[in-house]
Image (spheres, rainbow, N blue to C red):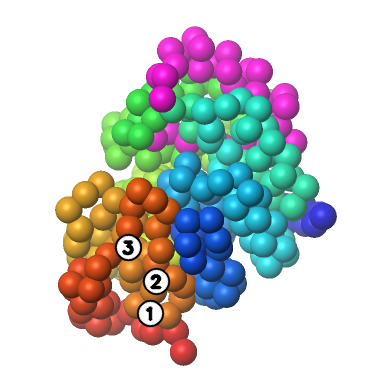
Amino acid sequence: MESNSSVLDRPLRGVIPPMVTPLLDRDRLDVAGLERLIEHVLGGGVHGLFILGTTGEAPSLSYRLRFDLIERVCSQVKGRVPVLVGITDTSFVESVNIARKASDAGAQAVVLAPPYYFPAGQAELLEYLKHLVPELPLPLFLYNMPSYTKAVFEFETLQAAAQINGIVGLKDSSGDMIYFHRSLSLLREYKDFAILMGPEELLAEAVMLGGHGGVCGGANLVPGLYVQLYEAARSRDLEATGSLHNQVMQISATIYSVGRYESSYLKGLKCALSCVGICGDFLAEPFHRFRRAERKVVQRYIDELGIPHKK
């Protein structure tokens, strides 16, 4: 059991990558790839790690594998940055179980989207949080992901949730900048409450207008780019922000856009990580890695973007 040695800053700021889960097959971690990925991401100067989120394919992974991942990540990170662990589940009890595992392993916080499948009403969602949070051994970040969960944290619910002791932030992956700005305005009085941007394409705007940082998938691949963009936006360096933002948009327009399905972002990201020698590109079923033709396209984009290969 690791101690929770890294202090969770309040509010949490910076770039917190939603780490991919390197896999060898449907229920086995790519351990060597995981170790390389952690060191690669931390080497880019990120401010935290978020595991078992959407980019980590959490809903597709067995609880055994999730627990294995939590233990290995926390053991390797050793408190160098805060580790946030996704506990989203359709089962209340399993969310609590994952949170307890995260705490025992040495994580600093947990992250929760609304339970998916049957969409909860707002009154039900708030009651759920009031019942869940006292059971959690770690601070909780809310995760607004309406495209996948079919539920949104509406503003009245969000404001009530921010008053619950133990809820410390929001990751907004709605892609709706009006929602993001209204959330910032609504929660301004809660000085320790972090509001983080999900889509990396909106990181610069979010930070320049008062957001605390971003949960950027591309920081798995080129973490330094997103850290530099965050720092430039926070210091209001418009020229640097514009240049770095353009690089982020090039990644989005190329590597994330090779496939034809909703999974294209994740397939492209995992394929790119494989191409540069960091970790394998196996995806949990029903998804599959890119075939040879798509992989060649991703490799060409990597070369054109000047993304270095790991030695």
Which residue bears the numbered disc 1? 276
The answer to whether 253 appears left or right of 175 in the picture is left
Label 3 with label 2: CB-CB less than 8 Å: no
Q: Which residue is mark 2?
A: 273
Q: Where residue 6 sits: x, y (%)?
A: 72, 56
Residue ID for mark 3: 289
Tag 3: Cα neighbours inside 10 Å, few (<14), some, or many (≥20)?
A: many
Q: Secondary structure at mark 2?
A: helix
The image quadrant that residue 97 belongs to is: top right
User: Please, is residue 148 above or below residue 29 in the view?
Assistant: above
Point out the image quarter for the N terminus: bottom right
Identify the residue at horizontal 39%, vertical 46% (top origin).
Answer: 198
* Foreground: disc 1 or disc 3: 3
Tell me the kind of residue under disc 2.
Answer: Leu
Residue at 58%, 13% in the rendered image: 127
- Residue 32 placement (x, y as % from top left): 57, 75
**Residue type indicated by callout 3:** Arg
Q: N-terminal of the two: label 1 or label 3?
A: 1
Q: Is residue 264 above or below residue 120?
A: below
Within-10-Å neighbours for mark 1: few <14, some 14–19, many 20+: some
The amino acid type, in three-letter code, at marker 1 is Val
Disc 1 and disc 3: Cα gap in Å?
Answer: 15 Å
Contact flag, marks 2 and 1 (Cβ < 8 Å): yes
- Residue 77: quadrant of the picture: bottom right
Instruction: From the viewer's side, name the closer residue of 106 and 31.
Output: 31
Q: In the figure, is residue 10 to the left or right of 52?
A: right
Q: Earlier in the sequence, mark 3 or mark 2?
A: 2
Q: Is residue 255 left or right of residue 32?
A: left
Q: The magenta stretch spans which residues?
A: 117-145
In x, y percent, where is residue 89? Answer: 53, 33
Q: Are marks 1 and 3 in contact (CB under 8 Å)?
A: no
